[in-house]
Image (tube, rainbow, N blue to C red):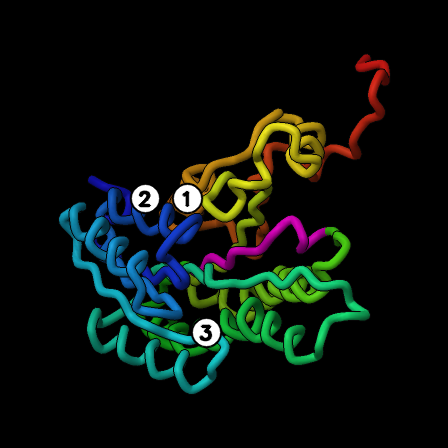
Amino acid sequence: MKLLEGKTALITGASRGIGKAIAHRFALEGADIAITNIADDEDFQSTIKELGGHGVRVKGYVSNAASFEDSQKVAEQIVKDFGRIDVLVNNAGIIKRIPMLEMPVSDFREVIDIDLIAPFLVSKRLVPGMIRKQSGKIINICSMMSEYGRRSVAAYASAKGGLKMLTRNMCVEWAKYNIQVNGIGPGYIATELTGPLREKGNPFNDLVMSRTPAGKWGTPDDVANAALFLASKASDFVNGHILYVDGGILANFGYVKGENDL
C-alpha cells in the first residue's frame, strides 16, 4: 500500500525545484496531483507530463498567487475537477533581494502577497472541505528566514516569519477537525536557481559549507521526503510544527577558522 494511495494533493508553484520534487514524491506514493504555476510555460507543461508518467491523475492550473480573485477561482476549479483536496502544499513564493532603504513599497507588498497572503487565501478556500470530511493536511513551505534575517531580504523574511505564525494559528483553529497544519523550513537547497552560488570559490558557497554541520547543500528530494512525512498518517499527531530541513544550520552558531573543535 502506497503512503498516499487514494489521496489528492495540491502543490502550488510546482513547475520546478522544491515544489516539483514534492509533486513527484507524492505521485510516486499514489496521490493524484494538482499543481499550479504563474505561467503556462515549458517547465510547467514538462512537469505535468512527467508527473503523468507515475500512473496517477494530474492536472495543471495557471494561477497568479498574488491575486485574490485568481486564487479563489483556481481553488474552486480544482475542487470541481478532483472532488476534494486531502493535502495542500503552499509552496509558491518569490524573493526580492533589495536593501530596505531602496525597496519600493510595491515590491515589498508583492512578496508579502505571494509568500504570506496567498497561503492564507488558498487554505481558507480548501479547509471547509477538509472540515466536512474531518481530515486534511496543510504544509506551508517556510524558510530559515522564518527564524533569522539576512541583509537585503526584509520582505521575504517578514513573509516567511509571518507564515510560521500563520501555520501555528491555523493549527490552533483547525486541529479540532483532524486537520494537521505544519511547515517545512528548507535550508540551502541545490536547485537550478542556486547553481551559480554553488560554484567552487563563490564566497556564499563557502559560507553555506562552513555553517552547515552536514557539510553540504540539501537537495529538493530532502525537502520532498519531509513533506511526505507531514502528508502521511505518520504525522497525525504532529501539528503546528516547523520542520527545518537544513543540515543543522540553525543549530550551529558557526566557528572561527583554527578554532579548537573539542
Name the secondary structure under disc 1. Answer: helix
Q: Nearer the viewer, mark 3 or mark 1?
A: 3
Q: In this image, 155 relative to 62: left or right?
A: right
Q: Amino acid at mark 3?
A: Ala
Where's residue 153, x and y in %? 70, 59
Q: Nearer the viewer, mark 2 or mark 3?
A: 3
Residue annotated with mark 1: 224
Q: In this image, 253 relative to 63: left or right?
A: right
Q: Earlier in the sequence, mark 2 or mark 1?
A: 2
Location of residue 110 (image quadrant): bottom right
- Say which quadrant the N terminus sits in: top left
Q: In this image, 91 relative to 217: left or right?
A: left
Q: Residue furthest bottom?
A: 69
Residue annotated with mark 3: 65
Q: Earlier in the sequence, mark 2 or mark 3?
A: 2
Closer to the camera in the image, 234 or 32: 32
Location of residue 213 (image quadrant): top right
Q: How many marks?
A: 3
Q: Is residue 57 magenta?
A: no
Where's residue 172, x and y in %? 58, 66
For the point 30% across and 68% down, the residue is: 40
Residue annotated with mark 2: 25
Label 2 crowd (10 A; few <14 / some 14-19 / many >=20): many
Q: Residue furthest left?
A: 55
